[in-house]
Image (cartoon, grey):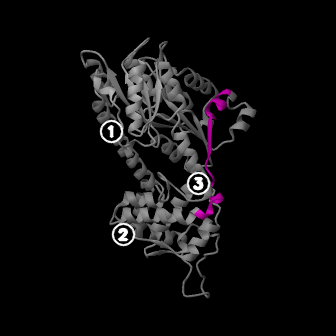
Amino acid sequence: MTSATAHAFNPPQLEAANLLNLVIVDDERAVRDVCREVARSLGFNTMVAESAEHTYRLLDSQAIDVVLLDLKLPGVGGLEALHKIKQRRPDAEVVVVTGYATVQSAVQAMKNGAYDYVTKPFTIDELKLLLERVAAHLKLKTENRMLREKIKSKLGFGSIVGRAPEMEKLYRMIAKAALSNHPVLILGESGTGKEMVARSIHFSGPFRNKPFIPVDCGSLVPTLIESELFGYVKGAFTGAVQAKEGLLAMAEGGTVFLDEIGELPVDLQAKLLRAIQEKEIRQVGSTKRTNINVRILAATNRDLETAVAQGTFRRDLYFRLNVLNLRIPALRERRQDIPVLAGYFLERMGRDLGQERTLSDDAMKALLAYDWPGNVRELENCLQRAFAMNSSMEIQVLDLPNAVHGGNGHAPIEGEGSAKIVPISEMEKKTILNTITQLNGDKLLAARLLGIGKTTLYRKLKEYGSPA
């Protein structure tokens, strides 16, 4: 530190630095005092720490934005301290201070995630410029984040659509869950969007640039779940011709989403619990244990408390996963979101296909009256089918599945009007051919919109005598 630090320093506060929390980590009191004076004059809310352990306690209890870190601390290496700081607060910017004759250690620190460095002795002006730069950088990051949140809030949160009070409560819970690294248990009926919630938690949090690995526990063959989760070594079993990394290891630093966790066999539950508690895994066929750093999000449509009472789900695993608990409301519990969701789906389908569709009043009434046991997924599939069946601008109640309109939108029989009874097979043929025509012959897209397999579509076209 040069003699320039001796004079008073009272510049106007930087707007960008206002409300930013900065911690000064240095074992020399004189250096801490000067850095604190400069930082406060720029508008930072400042704290000081004389050791790495003190710093970690502050990071665990405070929302720290900037760390001014002396690389030469007693009892701990500067790069080790940097690593632990970034582990605790990945979004915090770390400015390292070094008194070495060489800047090699500072350059290495920047490679390890530091924002910038300054060498001792430094002047007040040097420190001031550096803190101004980091404040402006954080302001830009905040503005970008606010812009993303503004885009998110147009209809809901991220890819989740809904404005009902129940959903607003869910969004607040997602935002809180995103800022921690605790396990989260996501509860909800089939079709409510549990994976969307998991993705929103991951991609709204500090580890958004790390992997997000979804695992459907209900679709995996029980005998293969262990090898999929933990990996295996070459020769571990018949067919293991080469080693394979498990999904837990592939998600290193990120998130593993265990969908339908209630379907996991009890013996695998014990191994998963051990992996979460010990933060280590052992590949199938190996005696070596490997450390992992992943966040666990789990989801289920089952009542896990009942499963625990029945002995089909481990109580200790349930409590380990249930640190944070999010429940997604069923669609029938937030009917006011049905018009919003319907408009969102129709707008997206229309954009993808270059066509526009709206819902008639009767069709909307039918959607609002239906209970939607399949929730948002069922609503989307319903509108895809209606979109494909209708060639006019407005979707009518008859374009919806019978289950939705409950027969109240029946076609008039002869004597009630000009229409006549049409066999279901004829209506099916007309719908399929009309859909393919509207899509300019794209049979794969037609099959997806109609909700049938491509093999089924080709077979029916052959029956109709149309070219496959």
Q: Is residue 412 above or below residue 445?
A: below
The kind of residue tagged 1 is Glu
Residue 252 shows in the view: no
Select label 3 or label 1 by which is in front: 1
Q: Which residue is mark 2?
A: 437
Residue 60: x percent and y percent? 53, 28
Q: CA distance from mark 3 to mark 1?
A: 39 Å
At a point 50% along the width and 71% down the height, the residue shown is 427
Which range is magenta?
Answer: 316-336
Identify which amino acid the numbered label 2 is placed on: Thr
Q: Quadrant of the C terminus?
A: bottom left
**Is 190 displayed left or right of 81 in the figure?**
right
- In this orientation, which residue lies closer to the viewer: 109 or 132? 132
Image quadrant assignment for residue 33: top left
| Neighbour tally class for label 3: few under 14, some 14-19, many 20 plus, Cα within 10 Å | many
Residue beneath disc 1: 132
Residue 97: in magenta span: no
For the question of whether residue 167 can be seen, the reply is yes
Outermost residue, left side:
102
Considering only order in the chain, which callout, 1 or 2, is on the residue closer to the N terminus?
A: 1
Tell me whether the residue at label 3 lies in contact with that at label 2, contact meaning CB atoms closer than 8 angstroms. Answer: no
User: Residue 4: where, in percent of width, then height?
Assistant: 28, 27
Q: Amino acid at mark 3?
A: Met
- Observer-side mark, 2 or 1, equals 1
Looking at this rendering, what residue extends furthest in the right direction? 309
Query: Which residue is at a point 36% across and 19% down the rendered structure image?
Result: 71
